[in-house]
Image (tube, rainbow, N blue to C red):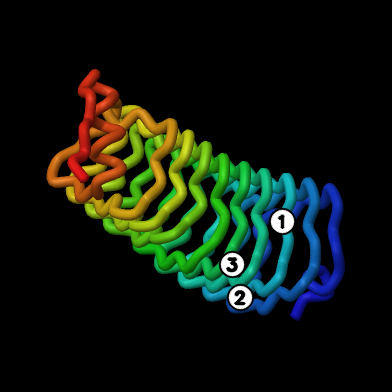
Amino acid sequence: MSDVLERDADGATFRDADWYGEEIGAVRFVDCVFVDVDMTEATTSGTTFEGCTFHNCRFNASTHHATAFVGCDFRRTSFFTARLDGCKLTGSVFADCTLRPLTVVGGAWRSVTLRGANLSGVDLSGIDLREADLSMADLSGAVLAGAHLDAATVREADLTGADLRRASVNGVDLTSAILRDTRIDLPAAVSLAETFGAVVDVAE
């Protein structure tokens, strides 16, 4: 393992680094810049990336356990076949990134920006996506069962065939999304109906 992966870093720049298959533990990277860094098949566990920038990086087939990417900026970065297990992505921004296929197990993605992202078919069950920006995202066939979507923005998001059962959607304007064959439960249906001005009288 490279010595740089065994100690904390603050404000460092990593360019064209080869971290293929590396194992990164509970170290902390703050305000660091990663450009063209290859983390293919790398493993992180309890690692913290705070306020970091990732441009043209590769996380393909990598595994991340209880890792935090807080307030990070991802641009043209690939997570092809990556696994995120109990990770925290709060406040991070993804632009022009490859995010599928992707395995996600739990985690906090509050206030994440995934505008225009392709997440079709991705299982995001139970994820905390409160206040997330999912505008124009492709969520067709995605599984959002039990997810926390309160106050999320779904303007022009494609939810065709998506599963929203048991998801909390308080403050979500579902009328601004594309809903075709979208699976929702009674609370979401009531919220949607009330948005259109209906008075819902659920018989006891």
Q: Seen in the image, is 197 located left or right of residue 105? A: left
For label 2, the residue is 43
Percent of width and height locating residue 43 = 61, 75
Res. 187 image quadrant: top left
Res. 88 image quadrant: bottom right
Residue 49's tag is: 1
Q: Which amino acid type is shown beneath numbered disc 3?
A: Met
User: Compared to 101, does 12 lie above or below?
Assistant: above
Dot in front, 1 or 3: 1
Circle 3 — which element? loop
Q: Which amino acid type is shown beneath numbered disc 2?
A: Thr
User: Compared to 168, does 64 lie above or below?
Assistant: below
Percent of width and height locating residue 31 = 78, 46
Q: In the picture, which quadrant includes the C terminus?
A: top left
Distance between the alpha carbons at the discs numbered 2 and 1: 14 Å
Distance between the alpha carbons at the discs numbered 1 and 3: 14 Å
Residue at the (13%, 46%) spot, across then down: 181
Percent of width and height locating residue 57 = 56, 55
